[in-house]
Image (spheres, coloured by chain):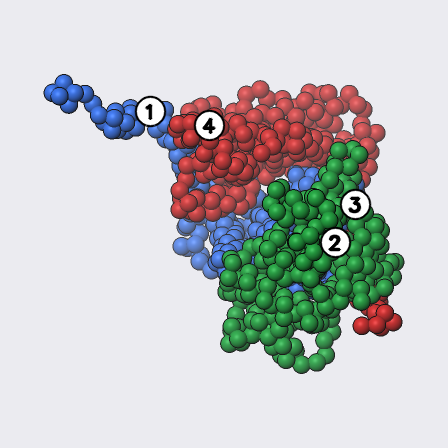
Chain colours: A red, B blue, C green
Amino acid sequence: MTTAALDLSGDPKRKRRERRVRILFQSAAVFSIVVSAAIVFSLIGRAIGFLLEIDLSQLWADGWFPRRGRFDLRTIVWHTLVVSAIAMVVATPLGLGASVYLSEYASPRARRVLKPILEVLAGIPSVVLGFFALKFITPNILTTFFPGTQQSNLLAAGIGVGILIIPLVASVSEDAMRAVPIALREASYGLGAQKWRTSLSVVFPAALSGIVASLILGLSRAIGETMVVAIAAGATGGSLLQVNPLNGGQTMTGAMASLAIGSDQVVGEAGTFDSLFFVGLLLFFMTLALNIFSERFVKRFRQRY
Amino acid sequence: MATRSKMPTTSDLVKASISGKKTDFVGIAVAFILLLTVFVSLGILITLLADMLIKGWSVFADRGWDFISSPLSPDPEKAGLSQAIFGSLILMVFVVIVAFPLGVGAAIYLEEYAKDTRMTRFIVANMRNLAGVPSIVYGLLGFAVFVQLLSGITNGRTLISGGLTLAVLVLPIMMITASEALRAVPDALRQASYGVGATKWETIRHHVLPVATPAILTGSVLTVARAFGESAPLLLAGAVLSNFFSAPAGTGVVTLVTEGDYTALPIVVFNWARQPQKEFVAITAAGIVVLLVILLLVNGVAIYLRDRASRRAA
Amino acid sequence: MNVFSVHDLNVYYSDFHAVRDVSVDVKEHEITAFIGPSGCGKSTVLRCFNRMNDLIETARVEGEIKYHGVDLYGGEVDPVQVRRHIGMVFQKPNPFPKSIYDNVAFGPRIAGFKGNLDELVESSLERAALWDEVKDILDQSAFALSGGQQQRLCIARAIATSPDVLLMDEPASALDPIATLRIEELMHELKGEYTIIIVTHNMQQAARVSDRTAFFNVSLNEQGQRTGQLVEFDETGLIFTNPKETATEDYITGRFG
């Protein structure tokens, strides 16, 4: 081969095509930033508008009754915390237990059956669990144990949300436990430890960062869950701050849903509809903080193998 | 000799010490509790399904196909799901057309092209955070952007607004599943392709995508199933929450999509669930059964795709 | 005639100085072997010849590599075009998950090959000494072949784009002794048409197949970091019988490494 014949510069047509394809994919990736920007801007503008329309003392009023201009944040935030706490009480033992069982105890055959079932549970829409909470959990279970239960109540909603996040907690923490190297388990067995001791004292702590992350993610999902509370927690239109979870009450998402479905869209006090954006912004930042915290937590405390 | 023969031999001692005689109560208890948690979760699932079937059975028995093919009605004896199913199907078409190419395209860029720059890391972190944003917040986005800001294009409260809102909602999930699928493709394959003088796009198109496609499809179908069950964002993105709405007689599909009122299956379930009359309980449960059957079919397709792919790889 | 002339080649991965000041000439229709202990940079240098290092984000190459007198790292040069002239065979056989035929045909297809593809596939497989074994199963998956057959398929795949250089990165290290022998025989047959550079950790292999041998070693630089360096480069016979450097002698006699 002679030097003159050697052309290594490549086909310009092919290079142009490469560049075009690259730009196409790059714009798809950049689009996700456009989406976040759109979310933040659509929330912030009207949330600020809301704050300007009302008197700030209205945020610290007697109960959440947007039509009457009472936007007591304590009420809806407290109810959200109650529902989320109940959800975590349900989902933590069931989700973690299932994850330890699936990762450490289940035979491959049992896993092949149980995992898809867990996926089915994960795929059940939240409206379904809302209806289940309203028409089964409350009348068939709660009224049996607590005769004073209201037809719509925070406890049933919390249980419904809890059921909804069991699969999330289970699958994320199972992944964390399965990521623990076999060698660590063998080391434990090699010292004569039983299976339960290996699972609970070696694997579980080694996977702790992922397990905690699964719980934080579960909490974040519980706080943002809308349809279950919209159906089962009741109090469409507004509520006073309820200490008793057997009463109905409005959560942040519940308040948003009832504003959204228009039952409150009738002209009320100033800012009635825009309060939706203010609560949405609050919710956005709460869940964002939890998600970032869970990711940081995994990064900071992940053990290196 | 006699005394010596009475002494235990080494093998007796070894045997005694390695045959476990003590019952490990803690171990049994732990295994029992773990199994119990699994059965409680399963029990909840079975109870839920059974409850819906029992409550909704009379609707299928009495009305059969009529329940599926009838439009909405304030009369629970006549109300049906045809408009809801139509709306949900069109919404999914939007999700597939918009979110699938954008999500897969973005994933290809991030996994195959992007260098590890601050911009790339920002996009990835942003995508993960978007996936965690509550769905009702996407509803606010849909309301502000698609229903109001872009009403010139979407005609306000139409299926276009709803479809775009759901597409944006599942976009980050689509990106994450596609990214994982691409990351699972072994690097040796890319090297082999570059080694014979293929360009980046030729490598992706001929080698990376064919290997990643089953996983991408499975993830996408599961994601579409998730969008199918979403209702909170549609409350804000213009779905009609009413016991009755009608389209002018003889309107075509295109007009229905671009101009008509719309609803979706989970929205109808929600609307029925909040009706105070007792007669709505049965059709709500029956609507849930239809919703779950469709989801089960869709998920079944996804699991079938995944199984077929893993069997072929083996 | 020199196919490659390398002058003061330095390779960095981020801050890590992987290879320092390598200068070497590779002659046409010869087999040049790169030997040395692990971490000595021999594979890194090999991957500079077809710009595979461009695929590693953090890699930086300094110095000069001339390919038939053309600077491989010159501004006009397209790495993709380079790889069509300079084929590569990897350490682990890495056939595409496609049919045997498509494995060989892929390279020519994307290069816009206009001739008779069937003939090209046949002749490439023949040159890789695989034709007789696969001629009846061309449409079967490449994964159905044994490891040694897969590696010869990868050689056929590299040949099919009609390169003039073959880079082989420890091509037999994942194979059993019999399959290794087949590969070595094949290299002898191929060197009439191609210039071959082989990286190997197996000294006997270098002694058996190569005309010239470059011995690389690990040294510590001023900051105490490990860096690969070329110690000695000569005709294979001389390297193995009469090395000039004591480090080379120590390595080939098995005193370290």
Whether C124 is drawn above or below A96: the answer is below
SS assignment at label 4: helix
Discs 4, 1: same chain: no
Please name the residue that numbered disc 1 is placed on.
B25
Depth check: B117 or B309 in front?
Answer: B117
Q: Which label number is shown at residue A200?
A: 4
Question: Is A42 situated left or right of B227 in this image?
Answer: right
Please name the residue that numbered disc 2 is placed on.
C233
Within-10-Å neighbours for mark 3: few <14, some 14–19, many 20+: many
Kindly report which numbered mark, 3 or 4, lies closer to the viewer in this rendering. 3
What's the distance in space between the residues labelled 1 and 2, CA to CA?
70 Å
Within-10-Å neighbours for mark 1: few <14, some 14–19, many 20+: few
Depth check: A162 or A169 in front?
Answer: A169
Whether B83 is drawn above or below C36: the answer is below
Q: Are marks 1 and 2 in contact (CB under 8 Å)?
A: no
Discs 1, 3: same chain: no
Amino acid marked by disc 2: Phe
Amino acid marked by disc 3: Arg
What's the distance in space between the residues labelled 3 and 2, CA to CA?
15 Å
Amino acid marked by disc 1: Phe
Whether B30 is drawn above or below B219: the answer is above
Within-10-Å neighbours for mark 2: few <14, some 14–19, many 20+: many
SS assignment at label 1: helix
Q: Are marks 4 and 2 in contact (CB under 8 Å)?
A: no
Discs 1, 2: same chain: no
Instruction: Please state the chain letter of the residue tagged with numbered disc 4 in the rendered image.
Output: A
Whether A42 is drawn above or below C166: the answer is above
SS assignment at label 3: strand
Q: Which label number is shown at residue C20?
A: 3
